[in-house]
């Protein structure tokens, strides 16, 4: 304590009151900021992954095979054949 000041019940209650008021203001701010800090850490991790050079390269090729159907026209009838 400071010289010349005595410890009284009133001064102790006043200090406890100021401490509790401060805690009541800081705790909600902390609870709101905690997820933002966690997300910022995760964002840095994701950014770090995007900044890394790829370890291996993969070449993707796609081949398309289409079967060719032969269309045979049968002239045994006088009617045209559109689809078989």
Image (cartoon, rainbow, N blue to C red):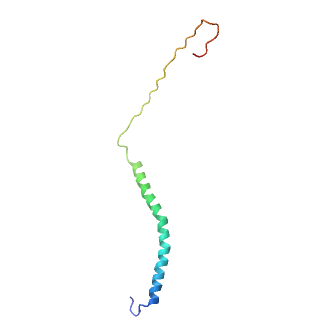
Residue, x 50% and y 69% (percent of image)?
Answer: 28
- Where residue 41 appears, x then y in whole percent? 42, 58
Residue, x 43% and y 56% (percent of image)?
Answer: 42
**Please, is residue 3 above or below residue 62 in the view?**
below
Nearer to me, 13 or 50: 13
Nearer to me, 56 or 1: 1
Nearer to me, 42 or 19: 19
Q: Residue furthest right?
A: 79
The quadrant holding residue 60 is: top left
- Where residue 68 appears, x then y in whole percent? 50, 18
The quadrant holding residue 75 is: top right
Dividing the image into 4 quarters, which one contains the N terminus? Answer: bottom left
Q: Residue furthest left?
A: 55
**Please, is residue 65 above or below residue 35 in the view?**
above
Nearer to me, 13 or 55: 13
Dividing the image into 4 quarters, which one contains the C terminus? Answer: top right
Residue, x 49% and y 78% (percent of image)?
Answer: 21
Residue, x 63% and y 11% (percent of image)?
Answer: 80
Q: Residue furthest bottom?
A: 4
- Where residue 25 appears, x then y in whole percent? 50, 73
Counting every numbered tag in the picture gives 0
């Amino acid at each position: 304590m400071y010289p010349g000041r005595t410890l009284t019940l009133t001064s102790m209650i006043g200090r406890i009151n100021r401490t509790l008021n401060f805690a009541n203001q800081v705790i909600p701010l902390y609870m709101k900021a905690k997820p933002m800090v966690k997300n910022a850490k995760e964002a840095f991790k994701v950014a770090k992954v995007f900044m890394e050079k790829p370890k291996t390269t993969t070449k993707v090729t796609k081949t398309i095979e289409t079967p060719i159907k032969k269309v045979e026209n049968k002239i045994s009838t006088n009617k045209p054949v559109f689809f078989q």
